[in-house]
Image: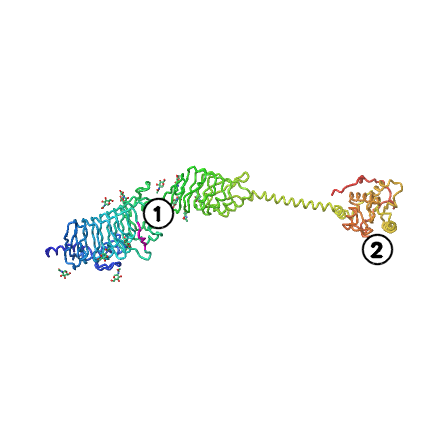
Amino acid sequence: MSRRLFIILLVAQFVRYATFMTWENWIPPFVNRTDLLCPSDRCELDPTLYVRTKNQCCTCHAEPSWKLFPFIYDLVLEYSRRGGTAQLIGNTTRTNARLVHSNGFLSKLPDNVCEFVNLVEIEATYNKISSIGNISCLQMLDTLDLSFNSIELIGNSTFQNLPLLRELRLISNGIKTVEPYALAGTTMSIFWADLSSNNMTKIDLSNLVPENRFCRYDFSSNKIVEIVNEQNFQINVDKIYHGGFVDLDANNITQWFDFKDLGIDDITILGKIMQFGLSLQEMKWTCDCKMEPFLELTQDALKRIWRDYYNVTCWDPPEYRGLSITEHFVKGDKLHLLICNKTSADKCPKECHCFYQPKNRTTVVNCTGVGLTRLPQYVPEGENLTLLFEGNTIESLEYREYLNRSYTISLSNNQIHTISSNAIESIGNNAFLDLSVNDMYELPRDFQSFDPCITKLGKIQISCDCGDEWLIDWVKNKRAEQCKNTTEIICIIGDESVSTIDLDLGNFCNNDTNLKFFNILVGIMIALLLGISGVLYTFRYELFILRRRFISKRSSKVYPYHKYDVFISFDDNDKELRIWVMKALAPYLQNFGYRIYIPCRDDKFGDVKKDALIDKINICKNYIIILCDKYHTEKNRWTTVEWKHIWHSFKLNQERQVIVINYHQLESSEVQENKLKAFVRVGNDIDFSNRKHDLFNDIKDRLGSPIRTNDGLKCAKTKFAARSLHNNELFALDI
Ligand SMILES: *[C@@H]1O[C@H](CO)[C@@H](O)[C@H](O)[C@H]1NC(C)=O
Ligand SMILES: *[C@@H]1O[C@H](CO)[C@@H](O)[C@H](O)[C@H]1NC(C)=O
Ligand SMILES: *[C@@H]1O[C@H](CO)[C@@H](O)[C@H](O)[C@H]1NC(C)=O
Ligand SMILES: *[C@@H]1O[C@H](CO)[C@@H](O)[C@H](O)[C@H]1NC(C)=O
Ligand SMILES: *[C@@H]1O[C@H](CO)[C@@H](O)[C@H](O)[C@H]1NC(C)=O
Ligand SMILES: *[C@@H]1O[C@H](CO)[C@@H](O)[C@H](O)[C@H]1NC(C)=O
Ligand SMILES: *[C@@H]1O[C@H](CO)[C@@H](O)[C@H](O)[C@H]1NC(C)=O
Ligand SMILES: *[C@@H]1O[C@H](CO)[C@@H](O)[C@H](O)[C@H]1NC(C)=O
Ligand SMILES: *[C@@H]1O[C@H](CO)[C@@H](O)[C@H](O)[C@H]1NC(C)=O
Ligand SMILES: *[C@@H]1O[C@H](CO)[C@@H](O)[C@H](O)[C@H]1NC(C)=O
Ligand SMILES: *[C@@H]1O[C@H](CO)[C@@H](O)[C@H](O)[C@H]1NC(C)=O
Ligand SMILES: *[C@@H]1O[C@H](CO)[C@@H](O)[C@H](O)[C@H]1NC(C)=O
């Protein structure tokens, strides 16, 4: 090559790189090298290039200075034998040495490659290299391009000691295996790795998540079915992963990554690698529940920063085929459509459709309208079940083990009439229980722990009675009015149906309580009345006497048939008494003008004694009874008869008075005859003991003024016959 031509070439190169760009020295913070130049205007000025940071940009666009200014020393290759072995020829100490040998027959790198420690670039595309071999000696190697060879394995030590290896191209080699940590590790810092169009069936996580910043790792068009983590690679939460772009397009991955299997128990850790770009296009994605957690986690980020290279479309299930995961599910907020079906093997009842729905954190058992007549015996495992049993002919809500791990229980449009307490107890208080449109006519009291705004009973009609106060309290306390839409309990009470919201059970039941109260009251009153009547009956005479005392006192009316002022009835067998009456009482009263009838004195001999007695009693206005111990006894029959008629007369005629003089000072208990006893009891008797002064005055007072007639002093039969004042029968007091 002539010097002239070299200069032209040099200028051409310079123009190519330098004319339009300003290159400035860039020292990556993560690798010890100073030979990189970064197109600063491109990485700082052009905002359309999705440049996140200068480092990110430079990672992709920086070039070693020897590439920009081709101070390159090309080595010469010489085949030593058939079979593709070769030797390098050149000055082993020259810097920036390069081997370029494409479309050859190399079966491996030249044997003496380690002698050229300053090799910075090897380009041996379209050869027949089947193994890279041990190149740890090439400490200065920056670029290795072995595309279109036959390499099948990349071992974990192959690039490990190449700290400056920046670009690695191994396109279309038929690589089957890339060992864990083959591309990424603490001693490596590969910016570009292109392993597209190979035969890889799996890729290890450790090779996808380099600690150091990188530009693009391309694994597209392999046969990768899954991402694995064979060496238990862990994302270091203390490190900052700046990431880069990973292209996995056109592989055979269909199932979303199971992050648990990848050793990522907490997928929020993936937030550490959120700055990574990941292209997953041209794969037959199965859009199911496995995708959901990742998408949910990255939802915000996906909406904001992940761009169209994240053009991932569904293949399965068929109904989602062609739908963009980002556009349809993430941006369209339809992540709840990403589900995994559960089969009979997962205990899904055979008539039903069961699926796990991570977005709603629930496992749905959809038995809508499948003709169930009872609750299924079993449903899939899992917490927080959603049981959709509506539109069947289930007749009773019985206990099932799964009820207590169910969050939504829809039993509307069934024929439930029986609800077991067990079942209700096992349902959580906050469960959404929908029992609308069933045949319930009663509600177990266990319902009172539910919130009628959550437990949907629909509009149910039940028969209520006065024992259902809890129901009213329940409805009132839980403010059921606000959720009339979901739960309205209509009470059929008597002939009326009333919403429990308006129902005042009192209106219906007070009658009863009133009645009870009334009954009690009546009872009490009857008892009282009986008691009172008893008392009244017992003291009937006393009451009568008292009443008379008030009514007839000082009656001054003149009754023409009164011939005598007073009839004195006493035991005339008592001599002493007889003397006192004759000599003391009678004269005293007569002295004041009273006319007195004393039977023993005034009775005409030969009168039919009883008839005469009745007549005499009738024509006397008042009666003095001198009560002695024998006054009313069997022996003294006569006074007994006298008393009987006196009482009768006294009772019928209000103007008459009976004055009882307690001659023997008897206690009421000593008096046998009830009426006499009553006189003593009410204190209406005159105590004989005070005879000295007051006795006579007392008697006089009680008698009132004497009646004035023309008749003489003798008791005599008058012409005024008593007008049937008497019938001779014994009478009974009717009070
Ligand atoms: C760069 O080299 C220096 C010493 O040569 C060392 O201390 C430092 O850790 C290295 N940095 C990196 C990122 O390798
Ligand atoms: C090899 O290159 C070095 C400089 O890098 C030079 O000093 C030496 O003479 C060269 N050797 C030969 C044989 O050309
Ligand atoms: C590669 O070669 C180096 C010496 O250049 C040696 O130390 C190392 O053990 C070799 N590695 C393998 C895997 O053979
Ligand atoms: C490399 O792989 C071998 C087995 O393939 C393993 O024993 C070794 O620990 C690995 N080394 C690293 C650094 O991963
Ligand atoms: C990949 O493997 C298949 C057989 O599994 C083979 O037919 C094909 O040629 C391989 N591809 C490459 C690039 O080696
Ligand atoms: C990968 O997918 C291709 C077509 O997409 C298919 O022919 C091939 O059998 C699949 N390979 C594996 C291992 O699944
Ligand atoms: C997504 O990929 C399909 C083919 O897989 C392509 O037709 C479509 O244009 C891509 N969409 C975007 C936004 O890149
Ligand atoms: C789940 O099952 C339903 C009905 O059998 C089916 O239509 C749907 O595609 C299935 N979904 C998935 C993700 O398998
Ligand atoms: C899951 O939640 C969405 C709203 O986030 C709702 O539309 C959907 O009906 C729910 N699915 C089930 C089965 O409850
Ligand atoms: C249970 O499932 C419901 C949806 O049916 C959901 O709203 C709720 O957050 C879930 N609860 C838990 C603890 O996962
Ligand atoms: C449950 O199944 C019924 C009938 O198959 C369907 O109409 C309804 O949408 C399903 N509900 C859910 C949440 O899958
Ligand atoms: C009840 O239903 C009506 C219309 O059907 C609706 O406007 C109202 O918001 C609902 N109330 C509640 C508390 O859901």
Distance from disc 1 to disc 2, alpha carbons, whole Å, reads 124 Å
In the picture as drawn, the residue positioned furthest to the right comes out as: 605
Q: Residues within 10 Å of mark 1 (few under 14, many from 20)?
A: many
Name the dominant secondary structure of the magenta segment. loop
- What is the three-letter code of the residue carrying label 2? Lys
Residue 231 magenta: yes
Q: Is mark 1 within 8 Å of ligand 8?
A: no
Question: Which numbered disc covers residue 692?
Answer: 2
Of the pair 130 and 18, the residue shown nearer to us: 130
Residue 11 magenta: no
Q: Is mark 2 within 8 Å of ligand 12?
A: no
Of the pair 475 and 579, the residue shown nearer to us: 475
| Residue stretch in magenta | 228-235
Q: Residues within 10 Å of mark 2 (few under 14, many from 20)?
A: few
Question: In screen coordinates, is 595 left or right of 295?
Answer: right
- What is the three-letter code of the residue carrying label 1? Glu
| Residue 619 pos. (x, y %) | 83, 43
Q: Secondary structure at mark 2?
A: helix
| Residue 576 pos. (x, y %) | 87, 51
Q: Secondary structure at mark 1?
A: helix
Question: Which numbered disc covers residue 292?
Answer: 1
Question: In screen coordinates, is 580 left or right of 45?
Answer: right
Residue at (54, 45) in percent of width and height: 469
Compare marks 1 and 2 and give the one earlier in the sequence.
1
Of the pair 693 and 244, the residue shown nearer to us: 244
Where ligand 2 lies, by quadrant?
bottom left
| Residue 678 pos. (x, y %) | 77, 48
Instruction: Choose mark 1 or mark 2, whichever is in front.
Output: 1
Of the pair 171 and 430, the residue shown nearer to us: 171
| Residue 76 pos. (x, y %) | 14, 54
Figure coloring:
rainbow
